Image (cartoon, rainbow, N blue to C red):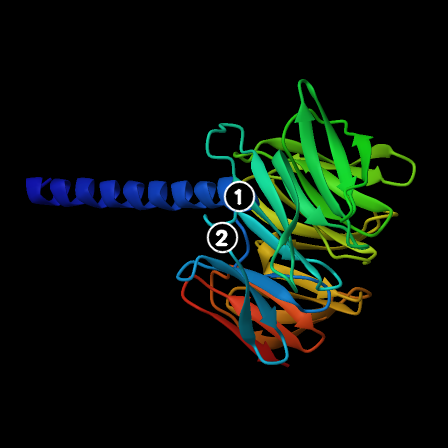
């Protein structure tokens, strides 16, 4: 065989191998870091959201009526997570602990009206607002960890968790929340359903690359796992664990719902609407591929974010 042809074949093989390695590495990196990445805008159930403005070093409140942003507070460093309370009165944000190798976070809760800090906690994990406006977070103490649920006045409830490592909290309603094990890789993880009223926990789900999504006061939850190298999402009723649907080749950032009327999800450059009672899809919009964030702000308005831009659209 001609030496030139052999060299061309070798070069072609090397290019294919390099491209495959780049794709796999990029995909694994995305899966490893996704649980720690803050959304572009984080919304509550009323369609109010907050975002970090890196040009102004501030956190801003989004108004869904005008599609505009208003500064709430200046910050010294970029938050890894921020959230507005269900009643829109308070803002929480978390920043990385600078001298920590454990992914610990420092928490600040801000009064939106006065822009003053009313609550702070150091070296905690996964702070969130509950459905009734309390602040919940994980605290690791030695070989064990606990949930702390604090009201704005600082009165705190403590619940022992069945995990000793860093977790991610997903509140459901005033009485229940989900905590799942956080992992930088796509290994096996477990999620637990926590009964806040009775201070008890029970196993909720397991799987590789496990992530959970809940919507406040919804009877549904979504579970992301990776099976045989393929990512997918399962929608189910969290209380009965009755499966509504399995959707392959999408991630949790690609799906959203509110008020249990229907859910929307993005796949292959399109956004679909589907009822929880059936699997009939209706295409409602085009979408960038890949999508960074899809949020149903109100029942006929979507917030869509890609690597290049963020925008809203109605349907």
Query: What percent of the width, then of the height, locates residue 50?
Result: 58, 62
- Please tell me which residue is depicted at 77% across the width and 29% down the height of the picture: 161
Query: What percent of the width, then of the height, locates residue 264?
Result: 66, 67
The kind of secondary structure element at disc 2 is loop
- Please tell me which residue is depicted at 71% across the width and 47% down the height of the picture: 170
**Depth order, front residue of 116/195:** 116
What residue occupies the far left of the structure in this picture?
3
Write down the quadrant of residue 314 in the picture.
Answer: bottom right
Q: Is residue 123 above or below residue 232?
A: above
- Would residue 211 be visible to someone looking at this image? no
- Please tell me which residue is depicted at 58% across the width and 56% down the height of the picture: 253
Q: Nearer the viewer, mark 1 or mark 2?
A: 2
In terms of sequence position, does the residue under pointer 1 or pointer 2 come before the other?
2
Q: Is residue 111 above or below residue 154?
A: below
Residues at circles 1 and 2 in contact by the CB criterion of under 8 Å: yes
**Depth order, front residue of 2/248:** 248
- Would residue 140 be visible to someone looking at this image? yes
Query: What percent of the width, then of the height, locates residue 129?
Result: 72, 51
Query: What percent of the width, then of the height, locates residue 269?
Result: 50, 68
Quarter of the figure with the N terminus: top left
For marks 1 and 2, give the CA distance.
Answer: 10 Å
Quarter of the figure with the C terminus: bottom right
Instruction: Name the residue carrying label 1.
Output: 95
The kind of secondary structure element at disc 1 is strand
Callout 2: 10 Å neighbours few (<14), some, many (20+)? some
Total count of labels: 2
What residue occupies the far top of the structure in this picture?
143
Instruction: Name the residue carrying label 2.
Output: 75
Query: Residue 17, which numbered label?
Result: none
The reply, left or right, for residue 71 in relation to residue 124 is left
Callout 1: 10 Å neighbours few (<14), some, many (20+)? many
């Amino acid at each position: 065989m001609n030496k030139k042809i052999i060299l061309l074949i070798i070069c072609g093989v090397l290019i294919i191998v390099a491209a495959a390695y780049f794709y796999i590495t990029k995909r694994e990196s995305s899966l490893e870091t996704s649980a720690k990445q803050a959304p572009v805008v984080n919304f509550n159930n009323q369609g109010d959201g907050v975002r970090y403005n890196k040009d102004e070093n501030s956190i801003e409140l989004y108004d869904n009526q005008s599609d505009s942003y208003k500064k709430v507070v200046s910050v010294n460093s970029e938050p890894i997570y921020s959230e507005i309370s269900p009643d829109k009165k308070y803002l929480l944000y978390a920043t990385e602990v600078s001298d920590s190798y454990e992914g610990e976070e420092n928490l600040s809760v801000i009064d939106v009206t006065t822009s003053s800090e009313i609550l702070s906690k150091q070296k905690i994990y996964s702070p969130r607002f509950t459905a009734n406006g309390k602040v919940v977070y994980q605290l690791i103490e030695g070989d064990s960890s606990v949930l702390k649920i604090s009201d704005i006045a600082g009165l705190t409830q403590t619940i022992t968790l069945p995990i000793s490592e860093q977790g991610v909290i997903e509140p459901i309603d005033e009485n229940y929340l989900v905590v799942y094990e956080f992992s930088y890789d796509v290994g096996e993880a477990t999620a637990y359903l926590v009964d806040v009223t009775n201070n008890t926990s029970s196993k909720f789900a397991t799987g590789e690359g496990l992530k959970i999504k809940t919507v406040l006061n919804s009877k549904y939850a979504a579970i992301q796992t990776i099976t045989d190298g393929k990512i997918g999402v399962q929608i189910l009723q969290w209380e009965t664990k009755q499966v509504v649907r399995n959707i392959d080749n999408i991630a949790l950032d690609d799906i959203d719902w509110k008020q249990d009327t229907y859910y929307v999800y993005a796949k292959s450059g399109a956004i679909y609407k589907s009822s929880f009672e059936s699997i009939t899809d209706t295409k409602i919009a085009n979408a960038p591929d890949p999508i960074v964030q899809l949020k149903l702000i109100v029942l006929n308005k979507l917030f869509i974010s890609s690597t290049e831009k963020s925008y809203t659209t109605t349907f």
